[in-house]
Image (cartoon, helix red, strand yellow):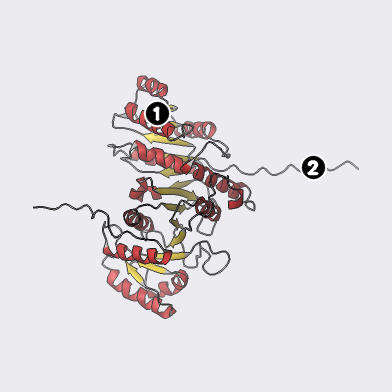
């Protein structure tokens, strides 16, 4: 009898490319980059979008923390020769000259400009009229890479690469996600200070990202020496497996060097978090750099428990559940599991006309739990909101953060 033909081992899918896109400072033209972002995600690429009017420093810092495969810039304001060079130079100065930069600008970038920009370090320019399919094919061919440990990486880039490796392991080998014990020694610190890890969940549109940014502002002001890390989870598309990771658009205060911000795609995980989120939390804790770690879930449903509040491995020290006033009525509140288990509950967007009724209904729902839960009312879209101040103080007390009583007062215009 002839020997059976051995089966070919299944080839693990490659982890998606991660591309950081942005529009330069003093440039408000975002329709082109929006089109490109959608097309990239449709082709299975994860897009970390910063928004428009972004400085070279902000772009370089974000590319490093996101461990991006490449940076893509959309420039229509005529300053491309100087700006692209500055981004390249900033990456090199931060030890990340291996992250290439490409861009486009319709008719504003000429072939002669491209030749100058390439000599200055820009990888390539896509000119007007280039078919989108050709652009996508070239990006997937030229900028794919295996994320491997690199002993030369330091600081945020080393942390970012460790998280990328954990993401790749969770995607390609779901049962072999990296653990802290396998981290490069440069990331582990003996006697590392304990981090307070806060999980933040809520339905889509509740304003979680804006609230996180305002909490970051309070941290930077009230904890002068500490660092804060943010893990922002967004959904992958179930069809293309690409994603638009857009939480950085709301992250105004992430431009501070004391903030580490990492966007994560769910990549098929149905828990509300990336399958690599537990490893990423462990990596950040093991580094000993962060007093506070905020973990934002995707917009969750009524039965969701992304942080293991009701069983299994609990990923966080405390949970904040965020609601907007338009949740549909009291019967809907009865169905939301995390209102039973959350340590903190925030009613955001309290400038909405329905907020007064919502406050009464949510507080009644919490009172039924008999756990002494406090409802915090916030309007995160307003800077210096006293409700956000009160919420931050409560979180800081729970996390054992030492707050400064000094510092400069909030910057407000005073007329004589």
Q: Which residue lies furthest to the left in this view?
A: 416
Q: In this view, does 171 lie above or below 272?
A: above
What x and y, as percent, mark residue 257? 38, 45
- Residue 105 visible (yes or no): no
Q: Name the residue under label 2.
A: 6
Q: Is residue 151 above or below residue 272?
A: above
**Along the viewing direction, whichever of 194 and 101 lies nearer the viewer:** 194
What x and y, as percent, mark residue 226? 39, 53
Q: In this view, does 226 lie above or below 39?
A: below
Residue 129, disc: 1
What x and y, as percent, mark residue 261? 43, 48
Tell me: 13 left or right of 110: right
Q: Tell me the residue at 53%/49% (across/down).
A: 239
> Label 2: how many residues lie within 10 Å, few (<14), some (14-19) or many (20+)?
few
Q: Residue furthest right?
A: 1
Residue 349 placement: quadrant: bottom left
Report, in whole angstroms, how far the alpha carbon at label 1 lies from the one at label 2: 48 Å
């Amino acid at each position: 009898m002839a020997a059976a033909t051995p089966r070919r081992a299944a080839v693990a899918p490659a982890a998606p490319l991660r591309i950081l896109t942005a529009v330069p400072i003093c440039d408000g033209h975002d329709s082109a980059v929006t089109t490109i972002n959608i097309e990239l995600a449709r082709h299975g690429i994860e897009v970390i979008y910063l928004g428009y009017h972004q400085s070279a420093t902000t772009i370089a810092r974000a590319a490093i923390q996101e461990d991006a495969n490449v940076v893509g810039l959309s420039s229509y304001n005529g300053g491309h020769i100087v700006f692209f060079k500055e981004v390249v130079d900033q990456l090199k100065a931060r030890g990340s000259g291996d992250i290439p930069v490409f861009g486009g600008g319709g008719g504003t970038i000429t072939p002669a400009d491209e030749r100058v920009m390439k000599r200055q370090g820009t990888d390539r320019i896509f000119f007007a009229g280039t078919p989108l399919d050709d652009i996508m094919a070239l990006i997937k061919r030229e900028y794919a890479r295996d994320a491997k440990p690199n002993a030369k990486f330091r600081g945020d880039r080393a942390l970012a690469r460790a998280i990328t490796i954990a993401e790749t392991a969770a995607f390609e080998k779901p049962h072999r996600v990296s653990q802290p014990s396998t981290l490069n020694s440069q990331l582990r610190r003996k006697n590392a200070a304990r981090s307070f890890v806060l999980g933040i969940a809520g339905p889509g549109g509740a304003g979680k990202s804006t609230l996180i940014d305002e909490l970051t502002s309070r941290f930077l002001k009230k904890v002068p020496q500490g660092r804060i890390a943010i893990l922002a989870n967004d959904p992958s598309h179930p069809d293309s497996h690409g994603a638009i990771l857009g939480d950085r658009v709301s992250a105004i205060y992430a431009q501070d060097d004391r903030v580490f911000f990492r966007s994560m795609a769910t990549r098929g995980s149905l828990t509300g978090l990336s399958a690599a989120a537990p490893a990423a939390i462990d990596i950040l804790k093991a580094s000993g750099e962060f007093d506070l770690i905020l973990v934002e879930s995707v917009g969750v449903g009524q039965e969701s428990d992304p942080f293991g509040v009701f069983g299994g491995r609990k990923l966080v020290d405390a949970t904040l559940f965020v609601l907007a006033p338009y949740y549909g009525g009291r019967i809907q509140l009865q169905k939301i599991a995390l209102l039973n288990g959350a340590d903190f509950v925030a009613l955001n967007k309290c400038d909405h006309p329905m907020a007064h009724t919502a406050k009464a209904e949510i507080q009644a729902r919490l009172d039924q739990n008999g756990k002494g839960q406090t409802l915090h009312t916030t309007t995160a879209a307003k800077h210096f909101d006293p409700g956000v101040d009160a919420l931050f103080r409560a979180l800081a007390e729970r996390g054992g953060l030492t707050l400064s009583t000094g510092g400069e007062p909030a910057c407000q215009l005073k007329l004589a």
